[in-house]
Structure formats: structure tokens, C-alpha cells
Amino acid sequence: MAGPSNEAAPTGKNASGFDNSVPPLHEDATPEQKDQHWYTHVYQGDKMRQLTPRAVIMGGLLGMAMCSANLYTTLKIGWAFGVAITACVMSYVIWNLIRLASGGNVSKMSILENNCMQSTASAAGYSTGSTIATMFGALLLMQAPPEGGTSADVKTLDVQPWVMVTLFTFCTGMMGVFLAIPMKRQMINHEQLPFPSGIAAAETLRSLYSESKEAVHKAYALIVGLLTSAVVGIMNTSEGTLQIIDKVFGEKGPLHSLHLPDQYPEAGFATVDRQGKLHAFWEKVAGTDGNLVNFSESPVAKRLIQFGFEPSVLLIAAGMIVGLRVSLTMLVGSILLYFFVSPYLIGIDAAHLLEVGNKFQDGYIPSIELVGGGTTYHIYRWALWGGTALMVMSSLTSLAFQWKSIGRAVSGALSSRKDGPKTDDPLTRIEVPFWWMLAGMIPLTIAMVVVQIIGFQISWWAGVIAVAMSFVLSLVACRATGETDTTPIGAMGKVMQITFALLHPGQVVPNLASAGIAANSASSSADLLTDLKSGYLLGANPRRQFLAQFFGVFFGTVAIIPIWYLMVPTKAALEKFPAPGTNQWFRVAQVLTQGLHSLADSAKVAILIGAVLGIILPCIEKFLVPKNWKAYWPSTMGLGLSWVVGFNNSLAFAIGALIAYIWARSHKKSAETFNIPIASGLVAGESLIKALIAMTATVLGLISSGK
């Protein structure tokens, strides 16, 4: 451990993740011996402050800010980033500034206080928002505009009342917290699963509280990255979004030369002949080449959505985090989609148009849809079918590989309940008792069933099944997170969608709601266990840490609901985002409930190919690719993701990954020290400022309209 007080410097860590001052325990130790060893040599919960009002408030406020950032990144690229490490660093810096401003009159936060803050922030910033953008976003996409109206006339608040959204978010977040109770001692204390993000957060806190120069430099590097990306986020805000930004960076503003366009090249488009050959990417090129179809007159020559380079440090930073393998796979997949597959399909659609007089015949479903008044090809509305099939089958295949883990998860939970705590168990007074789970889950189950019946037209018996399945799927998700640091939220949701396609056939709303229950509860459970792993390594009191996570759900729910309605006030506002995860949920629900007949034939082929690849590629990687070659094997998830996000996203990811790779090759030590802190700051800064800008624009719009 770090010593008897938070001022002591750590001495490093051993193979178990504990401090080197902790004596090793023999490998065949019994669960009781492991508990006694931890309680004797690691536990610090009675020696320093932990669950304090300032820790909970700091964590709650940081989590409220980070949930808006994660909502933005989910809408932008379909991912939510972990909150724990960023919150730890920000809390450390902010509290030191508060102490400095007070002249040293405010006491320093202990390392366990900061760990408790981490739990609150993580629950608020990550656990409560998993289904807001995906499930409720998909419900919003379902709504057709009123006759004679547009997507701007479809109000988010009219689709689902805020009371129902609040209850759903709160109940599913709380379900995850309580469902984690029977898993904690089995997975963390006894099996000592790694939960790599939990270990990383514990190491970050140890490093910060050692007060070494390197640790302080890491902290301030994250803050500098955050501020830098916030400035870039303001500079690349579209004109007309917010008047105050237009006055500075707009066409007549003093800093107009510093304004960054949404995308380079702004005039990018594709010209395609009947054979599907792609001829040009810039309008001026089309005007100078007599062999090309005229852009203004042809039904073939249209712009490609999200083609080009987007000046966003968020996307580049995401590539720095996920690495070269995933990012380069995404780029290759996007090149395949934009340069070969889509032009071929556009050519087929164009040939049909030209043959029948510039109008699709009844019954013909074009592969690549036109949007923006018929000016732009929306490529990934078609591509997401193949990409989603690939990712879903890949997730389920990987889950099947973990059948032993699934068995251990279920048997571990059952044995934990059966054995119960021994009368002489030293951890009885500090571990969360099993009856807390019963006391929490009974009212939550009732509330969740009522919410499903009233808000989502789900039969009471199916609602009970949804809650029961959420427990099983949370077990699986927590086991996967503990062993691989990847929470298969998507796979959990798809399992529920398939189940409810049978329980409630032909109904999209119950299908989406059931998936939301599984996804949110699974992510909340896995998040709590990740934080409890950090506390276990630092010697925290798990009962107090559980309460910190419990309070965090309140903070997150209070924040995420108004943020959702302010960021996405209408269907039109949602459609401005790529929202790959939202579109996946919506399209999968459509297919499961309405059948494949509404899709273009090419989309059906893409689903088949994606599903087959989703099974074959993980199998090849697991059974045929040598271990030392796995780093060079294409990422199956990256390939699938490249077909549900734009080319600009994949390009930015690849640029970020190459920056990190070149940095590591040229100066390994500095890259290892600063790559993740800087990238985390860049992600947090731009997403926070973009969320703030979107919410401010909505508020000002409501004020100006007199509503």
C-alpha cells in the first residue's frame, strides 16, 4: 500500500497490483486467506478519510460535466470514454488550486477520498447515460414528421416525456449498482480479476499522491490538452450555431482567419458513371474534365457525406488512445467503402435512374440514399447494415469464446449467495451485505416493470423477464470487463433485442426498451466493479465506495436528462450527428420487427457477408494467428466500425494513431508518459465545449422564440 497516510509515496506495485510493501500471498490461498491477507496488509479504510461530502460533491460535479462530454462523443463517434482517470486528475488539480486560493487553510484530500470521488464521478459520467443517445435516440428517429412538416417539427420532449426518461435512466443505473453486489467478492477479492482500467486508475492516484515531478506533469498535460481542445472546438463551430462565436470567428469577425471549416474539402463530391466508376472528388475538377458528368444537371453527380478531413482534435485524440491496429483497420475499411463498394452501388442506382427517366420505379429500393434535398449521397445509411452485422456477430462470437467465464460468473454468484459470510469474517462490517441487494432490487424491479408497461407498452410478464435477463447479462458483462477490460454493451443489447423480437414480435418500442435495460444495467455494474477494483488495491472501504457510486447515479440522472433535451431538442438536431450507435439500434430493431423486405437487395447481401466475417475473423484470430502476429491482424470491430462512421472519422483516427506510433518510436519514454493524459484531455475538452455550445444554442433559441 501507499503507507499509513496519503502523504506517503508508493513504492511500486507487485504482480497482484498491490504496493510492493504488501507481502506476497501463495497462489493456492483459500478465499478466506485472501480476505484476511487483504484486511491485514492492504485495508486503510479506518485510517483515513474516504466518504466525505467534499469527495461526493466534487465527484458529482465532475461526473455531471463528463456525462455531457460522453453524450457528445456517443453521438459523434458512437463511443463513450471512461471517466475515472480523467476525473482523478482533474479533481487533484482543482483541489490543489482550491488549497492554494485558501492559503493552505483547506486540508488535502486523502487518496481514498479521491478514490471515492472517482466512484461518484464515474457513476454520474458513465453509468447513467449509456442508453440516452442510443435507445431514446432510436425512438426519436422512428418518428415521422407531421404532414407538411420536417424533422425540425419532431420535438424530443414529445416523443417520451421527461418523467419517463428520468425514471428509466435512474432505475436502470441503480439496477446495475445493486446487481454488482453479489459479484464483488467473487470476482475482485477471491478470483482477483484484473479489471485493467481499475488498476490504471489506482496507479494514477498512487502516482499523483507520490507528488513526483512526472505525476504532476501528467496531470497538467491533461489539463493543457483539455483547454487546447476546447479552443479548437470553438474555432471549428459552424457559423450560425451561436451568435457570440460568430461575432469573433464569423465572416465579419476579427478572428475569421482562424475559423476552421467543418470539413476539408468543403466541396467534395463524387461523379459516377453507369459502370460505377468514381471519377472525381472536387467540383472544380468536374468542371474542367469534359469526360465527367456535369454536377448541376446529372442525377449521378452528388456530394459524399462526411468525405474529407474534419479538423477535430477529439477524433485524432481518440485514435491516439485506441492505437494503430484498430485505427488503420478503420481507414482501410472506409477506403474500401468510399472508393470501391459505394461507387459501384451508386452506378447501379444511377443506371436505373437514367434508364427510367430520372425516377425510381415502384418497388426499386436504391442502395445509397440521397439526403439534403437530393444533393448528397448518405453512404453509411446503407453501409451500417454490413458493419452492424459484422460487429454484432463478432461480439457474440467473442462472447461464445468466453463460455467458461460465463459459467464461472453464474456459479460464482450462486456460490457467493449460498456460502454467505462466515461469522468470524473480518470483512463482514465493511463489505456490502447481500440483503442490500434484495432491499434495492425489490422496489427497483417493481418500478422498472411499471415503467415498461406505461412508457413502452411491454407486458408485465415480459418486463419481469427483462429485469431477470439483465441480471444474467450483467454477470456476463462484468466478467468480460474484469478479464478483458471491454464491456460488451452492444452484444448485451442485441441479445435482449433478439429475445424481445420473439416476446413482442413486430413492435419496435418494446424491442428498443428491453435492449436499453440490459445495456444500461450491464454498463453500470461493470463500471462499479472497475471502481471497486481501484478501491481494493488502495485499501478502501467497499461499503463506503458503494455508497459513493450510489450517490453518483443521482448526480448523473439529474444532469443527463436536461442535457439530452438541450443537446437534441428535435429530430433534426439528432440527424446532424453521425450517431452510429443510435442508427445501429434503430436499424436492428427495424429488421427484427419488420423483416428484411424493406431493405435493398445489396443491403441484405451486406448483412450476410458482415455476419459471416463477424464469425470467421475472430475465429481465425483466436485459433490460427500466432500470438506475436495478433498485433498485425485486422481488428474485426474496427472493420465494422468503419462502415458505420464517416470517412472523415476513420481518417482522423488513423492520423491520431500514427502520431502516437511515431512519437513512441522516436521518444518512447515521453510517449508512455504523456500520450494518454494529453489524448484524454483532448477528448474531454472538445466534447465538453461542443456539448455546452449545443445546449446554449438551444436555450437561446427557446428564449428568442418566447417559449
Image (cartoon, rainbow, N blue to C red):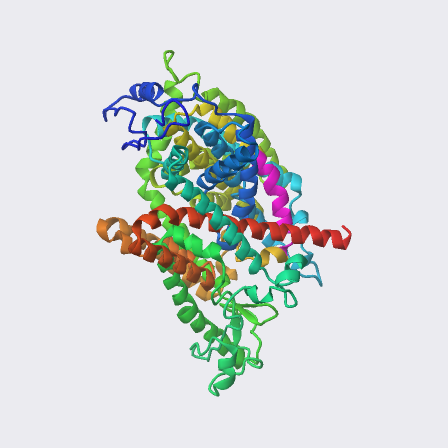
- In the image, 244 versus 448, the foreground residue is 244
Vertical side of 303 occupied by 541: above or below: above
- In the image, 294 versus 138, the foreground residue is 294
Question: Where does residue 31 sit, x and y in percent of width and height?
Answer: 31, 22
Measuring 61% from the left and 46% from the top, which residue is drawn there?
Answer: 564
Q: Quadrant of the N terminus?
A: top left
- Residue lying farthest to the right in this orientation: 706
Quarter occupied by residue 296: bottom right
Q: Is residue 388 visible?
A: no
Vertical side of 151 occupied by 433: above or below: above
- In the image, 704 versus 208, the foreground residue is 208
Q: Is residue 564 visible?
A: yes
- What range of the chain is rendered magenta? 555-571
Question: Where does residue 499 sit, x and y in percent of width and height?
Answer: 47, 43
- Residue lying farthest to the top in this orientation: 423
Measuring 48% from the left and 49% from the top, which residue is drawn there?
Answer: 224
Quarter occupied by residue 344: bottom left
Q: Give the prevailing secondary structure in the magenta stretch.
A: helix
Question: Where does residue 180 sit, x and y in percent of width and height?
Answer: 45, 30
- In the image, 397 versus 167, the foreground residue is 167
Left or right: 386 as drawn, with respect to 260: left
Whether residue 561 is in magenta: the answer is yes
Whether residue 459 is in magenta: the answer is no
Question: Where does residue 639 sit, x and y in percent of width and height?
Answer: 38, 58
- Residue lying farthest to the bottom in this orientation: 290
Measuring 53% from the left and 70% from the top, which residue is drawn there?
Answer: 266
